[in-house]
Image: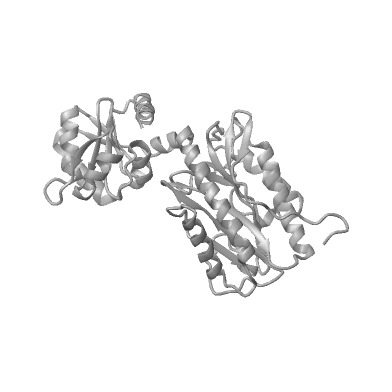
Amino acid sequence: MEQRIARLRAALRERELPGLLVTAPANRRYLSGFSGSAGALLVSAEAALLFTDSRYLIQAGREAPAFTLRELVNPGRPLSALLAEAAAELHLGQIGVEADNLSLATYRQLVAALEGADVALVPSGGLVEQLREVKDAEEVALLRRAIAITDAAIAAVLPELRPELSERQAAWMLEVAMRERGAEAASFPVIVAAGPNAALPHARPGDDLLGSGRPIVIDMGARLAGYHADLTRTIVLGEPDARFWEVYTTVLAAQRAALAGLRPGISGADADALARDVIAAAGFGDFFGHGLGHGVGLDIHEGPSLRRAAPNAPRPALQPGMVTSVEPGIYISGWGGVRIEDLALITPGGCEALSQAPKLQAPGPGQG
């Protein structure tokens, strides 16, 4: 954690910002190790403070030894009062706040508490998120473990799926399999979408049966020590027809092109184009609406973003250590859809596909 705090302090110096109040849960955990559900951090050049209440003092002491604890008490010593005390103690004239994660009510309380102390609150969103985009060795190791649990769970469940099972039953089987293999939770509600439901990228499993001969999109991931896996496979129970193979092989070719082209220095928009151009050339360009991928870590959706960009928008380059999903898809209303997703680690020489779950392979000439 000391290295992460040091990187944040360097970023604060670059912005000439004396301190940062960290309220986003993932950012709080990233910097301190504290996994409790309530609390905030204040990081300055001289101090690293963790504000939390009596429920979490013992836990915070164990998980965040690099931080000094300050107890929140409501009423009496809320965050606003403790922040005002710390600002005076540390002689902070400005404090950055994570505007995207701060409610208007809390912001007003902070402003009122700091009003007489000549301390300004400065919107500074994205500071910690940018640091989190490049994973350190500990984070990559945790992601590999979460991905391995996910791979093992889908391998165990796929042979048990039958046409007469419902989407909801299949989703529960997958979640149980992840839990049994060590996941602390699912990264997100498991998606199982069969037939026409597969045309909904974020479908909710229902009572529809898996059926035979139609696409079934499965999107799942295990969470381990706060880190998320994210995997999508499209399967068919029974014999896929020619239309399925046409759509499926197009998506698979698009994903292969993206994985072959991902490397440091390429922008997220150009990475997206690697797959999008393959899908468009096959005549399905209008059926791929979302971006190619997103970063994955302590949040299931974080930076970097692999998607189309406006003509004059910034195009940040991918860097070694980033972990991103690679998930092209084709979605056709009334028929269904196909999505294939793996997580990939950007390496100095390209990328490494971290997900190892098998994918369907189209039959060769004379087969099927």
Residue placed most toward the observer, 168 or 59: 59
In the image, taking residue 164 as reference, residue 297 lies left or right, namely left
In the image, taking residue 312 as reference, residue 184 lies left or right, namely left
Judge whether residue 80 can be spotted in this image: yes
Please identify the residue farthest to the right as the structure is shown. Answer: 366
Residue 319 location (% of width, % of height): 55, 31
Q: Relative to 49, does residue 249 appear above or below in the rendering? A: below
Q: Relative to 48, does residue 144 appear above or below in the rendering? A: below
**Total numbered labels:** 0
Residue placed most toward the observer, 212 or 296: 212
Quadrant of the frame with the N terminus: top left
Residue placed most toward the observer, 347 or 165: 165
In the image, taking residue 295 as reference, residue 95 lies left or right, namely left
Judge whether residue 332 can be spotted in this image: no
Query: Residue visible at 70% across and 44% down?
Result: 256
Quadrant of the frame with the C terminus: bottom right
Please identify the residue farthest to the left as the structure is shown. Answer: 76
Residue 143 location (% of width, % of height): 50, 43
